[in-house]
Structures are given as structure tokens and as C-alpha cells.
Image (cartoon, rainbow, N blue to C red):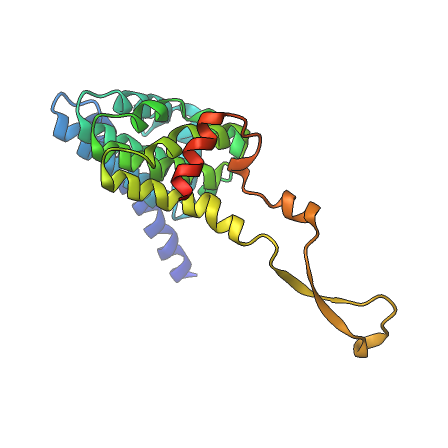
Amino acid sequence: RSSSLADAHSIQMRAQLDTRLMTGLLRRCLDVVPTVRSRALGSVSAALLALAGYPEGQHLLQDAITDHSFGGVRMHLPELFCAAATDEKAHTRRAALCLFEASLRVLRSALGFDAEFAAAHLPIDLLSGLACDESVMVRKASVASVGLLLQLCPRGQTYSLWRQLVLPLALDAEASVVERALQEVDAAVLAPLGQLGTVVPPLRRAGSRGGGGVTCGAVQPPMAMCSRLPGVLENIDSSEEMEYLRRASQ
């Protein structure tokens, strides 16, 4: 019992410490010094993930998302992301993407909100500007953010956004951006397509008896193959997107 009490006290002390740290970081996210803003945003992103790692921290985050306040300091994730994504400094815009990814992981994986809530809770339309950012590091990071959005919120709006943002970056003027975009195209399109028509687990022939029946592998029928097409290829009707996809797949 004493051990359980000690553990509970330790968890409570950690939650109190995390609250003090988070409130201090939140106040610095709007600092007048650009480097302070970017570092504070990066630290808030790390703190969100740390809080999501234990039950008491998850409760704190749940309350903060509902009340838009953490330890008496305003914490509205969409506002933080919007301010950072439109910041004049590239490092702060890059930090905005870190915040976006951390927020998305917390909402979906840690707190269990559905994809619709997570996508609606974050201003994903701002990703369009970040994917066209003048900074190479911001454009490159935007690919990873859109890829994570696709992974955690697979839905029609996400599929369309992925095609609009990732495919053009596969033809970017900067080689490192192209490389990262092609990796995402491979993961989201080419790899799933390579799985179509693979052999499924053995199926028992009709009329076989008991455990001694003859079994055989079977290639999935055409309808099953079509149903497994990557989501990003659903309802693709833009000739421009098709051309981007063709060139990215070469």
C-alpha cells in the first residue's frame, strides 16, 4: 500500500511540474524574440507528447483542449498553430509543423478523438501555404506533416490535400524536398499498389472434408483489388494531378 501511495504521489508531483513547465512555455510562444518563439513552440510540442505518455497527463490535456486553458494560461492549439504558421521567421514556421504533428498525435493516438474531430480541430488549410513556403526546410517538413495527416486521418479531404501538396513537391527545385516527397509518394501510392494481387491465405476447395481437404492459394478477384487501391487515388479526376503522379512515379 505504501508503495502505491508513493507512486501516486510521484505521479501527482510530475503532473504539477509538467503544468508549471507548460505554462511557462506557453507564455514564451508569443515572445517578441523570434528564436525564443521557435524554441518555445518546439518545447511545447515535446511537452504535449510527454504529457500524453501517462494517464494524469492525458487528463490535463483533455481538460486543456476542452477549456482552451492549461494551468490558467490560454492554450488553444489552433491559435498557436495559426500564429506560428504565419510567422515572419522560417524557423518559427518550421516549429509550427512540429506543433501540428504533436497535436495530431495527441488528439488521435493519446486521447482517442476520431479523424473528423482531429482534422476539424486543426486548421489544416494552412498546410497549403507551408508547402509553398520560400524556405526549403519548411517545404520539406510540410511533406512529413501531410504524410502524418494522411496516416492518422485517412478521409476524402485528406486524400485531396495530399495530392494537391505532396505531388507538386516531387518536382520541387530543391533536391532534398524532391527526395522527401518521393519517399512519401512511395509510401502512400507505390508500396500499396505493389501489394495488389498478392496471394491470399490458403482457401479450402469446395467439397473438401475435415482437416485432410486440399487447400490452395488464390489471387484476389478484381473487385477485391480495386477496393484496396490507395485512398489518395480515390476520386482523382484532375489531369494536373494525374500528370504530377505520373512524373513522380517514373
Q: Residue at x 33, y 21 (%)?
A: 79
Could you tell me if residue 74 is visible in this image? no
Question: Which of 72 and 159 lies nearest the eye of the viewer?
Answer: 159
Relative to 63, say whether 209 is above or below.
Answer: below
Q: Residue at x 40, y 22 (%)?
A: 125
Residue 224 horizontal side relative to residue 55, left or right: right
Q: Residue at x 36, y 24 (%)?
A: 128
Question: Which of 211 and 3 lies nearest the eye of the viewer?
Answer: 211
Question: Which of 133 and 111 lies nearest the eye of the viewer?
Answer: 133
Q: Residue furthest right?
A: 207
The quarter of the displayed image where residue 213 is located? bottom right
Q: Residue 83 in the image: x percent, y percent?
A: 27, 20
Q: Residue at x 47, y 47 (%)?
A: 190
Relative to 132, say whether 110 is above or below.
Answer: below
Relative to 224, say whether 33 is above or below.
Answer: above
Which quarter shows the C terminus? top left
